Image: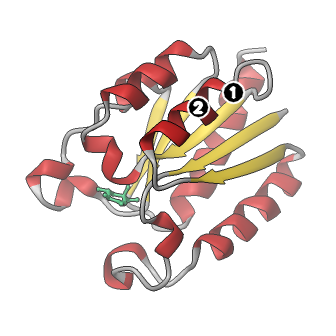
Amino acid sequence: MKILVLNGPNLNLLGQREPDVYGGESLDDIIALIKAKAGELGVDVDFFQSNEEGALVTRIQDSIGNYDGMIFNPAAYTHTSVALCDAVKAVDVPCVEVHLSNVHSREEFRHKSLIVAACVGQILGFGANSYILALEGIVQYLRRSK
Ligand code: DQA
Protein backbone atom coordinates (compact mmCIF):
# COMPACT_ATOMS: atom_id res chain seq x y z
CA MET A 1 0.00 0.00 0.00
CA LYS A 2 1.38 3.41 -1.02
CA ILE A 3 0.40 6.70 0.60
CA LEU A 4 1.31 10.18 -0.64
CA VAL A 5 1.76 12.90 2.00
CA LEU A 6 1.23 16.36 0.54
CA ASN A 7 2.02 19.65 2.26
CA GLY A 8 1.09 23.10 1.03
CA PRO A 9 2.54 26.61 1.35
CA ASN A 10 4.72 27.74 4.25
CA LEU A 11 4.82 24.27 5.80
CA ASN A 12 8.49 24.10 4.74
CA LEU A 13 9.02 26.67 7.52
CA LEU A 14 7.56 24.51 10.30
CA GLY A 15 9.69 24.67 13.42
CA GLN A 16 10.51 28.36 12.93
CA ARG A 17 7.03 29.50 11.83
CA GLU A 18 4.68 30.52 14.69
CA PRO A 19 5.81 27.63 16.94
CA ASP A 20 3.16 28.59 19.51
CA VAL A 21 0.51 27.69 16.87
CA TYR A 22 2.18 24.92 14.86
CA GLY A 23 4.63 23.38 17.34
CA GLY A 24 8.40 23.10 17.39
CA GLU A 25 8.83 20.22 14.94
CA SER A 26 10.27 20.94 11.50
CA LEU A 27 8.74 19.36 8.40
CA ASP A 28 11.68 16.92 8.35
CA ASP A 29 10.92 15.96 11.98
CA ILE A 30 7.29 15.29 11.00
CA ILE A 31 8.38 13.29 7.96
CA ALA A 32 10.58 11.14 10.24
CA LEU A 33 7.62 10.51 12.58
CA ILE A 34 5.37 9.55 9.64
CA LYS A 35 8.05 7.22 8.22
CA ALA A 36 8.38 5.46 11.60
CA LYS A 37 4.61 4.97 11.84
CA ALA A 38 4.44 3.83 8.19
CA GLY A 39 7.09 1.21 9.01
CA GLU A 40 4.98 -0.06 11.93
CA LEU A 41 1.91 -0.21 9.71
CA GLY A 42 3.79 -1.85 6.83
CA VAL A 43 2.98 0.82 4.23
CA ASP A 44 5.10 2.92 1.88
CA VAL A 45 4.99 6.72 2.06
CA ASP A 46 6.16 9.45 -0.31
CA PHE A 47 6.32 13.15 0.49
CA PHE A 48 5.81 16.35 -1.49
CA GLN A 49 5.72 19.97 -0.30
CA SER A 50 5.12 23.00 -2.49
CA ASN A 51 4.35 26.66 -2.01
CA GLU A 52 2.65 26.66 -5.42
CA GLU A 53 -0.96 25.72 -6.04
CA GLY A 54 -0.35 24.43 -9.60
CA ALA A 55 2.48 22.16 -8.48
CA LEU A 56 0.15 20.62 -5.88
CA VAL A 57 -2.59 20.14 -8.52
CA THR A 58 -0.09 18.37 -10.80
CA ARG A 59 1.16 16.10 -7.99
CA ILE A 60 -2.43 15.16 -7.09
CA GLN A 61 -3.16 14.35 -10.74
CA ASP A 62 0.00 12.22 -10.89
CA SER A 63 -1.28 10.13 -7.95
CA ILE A 64 -3.66 8.27 -10.30
CA GLY A 65 -2.46 4.68 -10.54
CA ASN A 66 0.56 5.39 -8.30
CA TYR A 67 -0.96 5.74 -4.82
CA ASP A 68 -3.71 4.06 -2.80
CA GLY A 69 -4.35 7.06 -0.56
CA MET A 70 -3.30 10.60 0.26
CA ILE A 71 -2.79 12.72 3.38
CA PHE A 72 -3.03 16.40 2.55
CA ASN A 73 -2.33 19.55 4.53
CA PRO A 74 -3.29 22.22 1.97
CA ALA A 75 -2.31 24.97 4.50
CA ALA A 76 -3.66 28.40 3.42
CA TYR A 77 -5.02 26.91 0.15
CA THR A 78 -7.50 25.00 2.32
CA HIS A 79 -9.55 28.14 2.58
CA THR A 80 -9.25 29.42 -1.00
CA SER A 81 -8.54 26.75 -3.59
CA VAL A 82 -11.28 25.45 -5.87
CA ALA A 83 -8.49 24.03 -8.08
CA LEU A 84 -7.19 21.76 -5.29
CA CYS A 85 -10.71 20.65 -4.39
CA ASP A 86 -11.33 19.77 -8.03
CA ALA A 87 -8.00 17.91 -8.26
CA VAL A 88 -8.77 15.75 -5.20
CA LYS A 89 -12.25 15.06 -6.62
CA ALA A 90 -10.83 14.23 -10.06
CA VAL A 91 -8.56 11.41 -8.89
CA ASP A 92 -9.92 8.18 -7.47
CA VAL A 93 -7.45 8.26 -4.57
CA PRO A 94 -9.01 8.62 -1.08
CA CYS A 95 -7.64 11.63 0.79
CA VAL A 96 -7.57 12.72 4.45
CA GLU A 97 -7.24 16.47 5.12
CA VAL A 98 -4.88 17.34 7.96
CA HIS A 99 -4.13 20.44 9.99
CA LEU A 100 -1.68 20.92 12.82
CA SER A 101 -3.79 23.60 14.48
CA ASN A 102 -7.47 23.61 15.39
CA VAL A 103 -8.53 25.97 12.62
CA HIS A 104 -12.00 26.31 14.18
CA SER A 105 -10.58 28.02 17.28
CA ARG A 106 -8.73 30.57 15.11
CA GLU A 107 -9.71 33.41 12.74
CA GLU A 108 -13.05 33.02 11.01
CA PHE A 109 -11.47 32.84 7.52
CA ARG A 110 -9.85 29.55 8.60
CA HIS A 111 -13.16 27.93 9.57
CA LYS A 112 -14.10 27.05 5.99
CA SER A 113 -12.35 24.28 4.05
CA LEU A 114 -12.93 24.07 0.31
CA ILE A 115 -11.07 20.73 0.23
CA VAL A 116 -12.78 18.64 2.90
CA ALA A 117 -15.86 17.85 0.79
CA ALA A 118 -13.56 15.97 -1.59
CA CYS A 119 -11.96 13.99 1.28
CA VAL A 120 -12.96 10.88 3.22
CA GLY A 121 -12.23 12.71 6.49
CA GLN A 122 -10.37 15.45 8.30
CA ILE A 123 -8.04 15.47 11.32
CA LEU A 124 -6.93 18.67 13.00
CA GLY A 125 -5.66 20.24 16.18
CA PHE A 126 -3.18 17.58 17.36
CA GLY A 127 0.01 19.19 16.06
CA ALA A 128 2.42 16.76 14.40
CA ASN A 129 0.31 13.90 15.74
CA SER A 130 -2.49 14.94 13.33
CA TYR A 131 -0.41 13.34 10.54
CA ILE A 132 0.04 10.10 12.51
CA LEU A 133 -3.69 9.88 13.25
CA ALA A 134 -4.41 10.60 9.56
CA LEU A 135 -2.03 7.82 8.48
CA GLU A 136 -3.69 5.34 10.83
CA GLY A 137 -7.09 6.51 9.58
CA ILE A 138 -6.38 6.24 5.87
CA VAL A 139 -4.64 2.86 6.20
CA GLN A 140 -7.57 1.43 8.18
CA TYR A 141 -10.02 2.94 5.70
CA LEU A 142 -8.17 1.41 2.73
CA ARG A 143 -7.74 -2.00 4.38
CA ARG A 144 -11.45 -2.14 5.21
CA SER A 145 -12.51 -1.09 1.73
CA LYS A 146 -10.50 -3.86 0.01
C1 DQA B 1 -2.74 24.88 8.70
C2 DQA B 1 -3.89 25.85 9.01
C3 DQA B 1 -4.07 26.87 7.90
O1 DQA B 1 -5.13 27.77 8.21
C4 DQA B 1 -2.79 27.69 7.72
O2 DQA B 1 -2.92 28.58 6.64
C5 DQA B 1 -1.58 26.85 7.60
C6 DQA B 1 -1.45 25.65 8.42
C7 DQA B 1 -2.48 23.91 9.87
O3 DQA B 1 -1.84 22.89 9.63
O4 DQA B 1 -2.87 24.17 11.00
O5 DQA B 1 -0.64 27.19 6.89
O6 DQA B 1 -3.09 24.11 7.57
The dot on residue 26 is: none
In the foreground, 40 or 60: 60
Disc 2 marks which amino acid?
Thr
Q: Is residue 58 left or right of residue 117?
A: right
Structural crowding at the residue carrying mark 1, measured as other residues with C-alpha within 10 Å and reported as few (<14), some (14–19) or many (≥20): few
Q: How is the image coloured?
A: secondary structure
Who's the residue at 59% across and 42% down the image?
71
Q: Is residue 121 left or right of residue 6?
A: left
Q: Are marks 1 and 2 in contact (CB under 8 Å)?
A: yes
Q: Considering the numbered disc 2 on the image, is that residue within a helix, a strand or a loop?
A: helix
- The residue that label 2 is drawn on is 58
Structural crowding at the residue carrying mark 2, measured as other residues with C-alpha within 10 Å and reported as few (<14), some (14–19) or many (≥20): few
Ligand 1: give its quadrant. bottom left
Disc 1 marks which amino acid?
Asp
Who's the residue at 80% across and 52% down the image?
38
* Residue projecting furthest to the left: 108
Residue 83, horizontal then vertical, whole percent: 38, 27
Who's the residue at 42% across and 22% down the image?
118
In the foreground, 126 or 4: 4
Q: How many marks?
A: 2
Q: Is residue 38 left or right of residue 105?
A: right
Q: CA distance from mark 1 to mark 2?
A: 6 Å
The N terminus, quarter of image: top right
Label 1, ligand 1: CB separation under 8 Å:
no
Label 2, ligand 1: CB separation under 8 Å:
no
The C terminus, quarter of image: top right
Above-or-below relation of 28 to 60: below
- The residue that label 1 is drawn on is 62
Residue 85, horizontal then vertical, whole percent: 39, 26
Above-or-below relation of 82 to 110: above
Who's the residue at 30% across and 59% down the image?
102
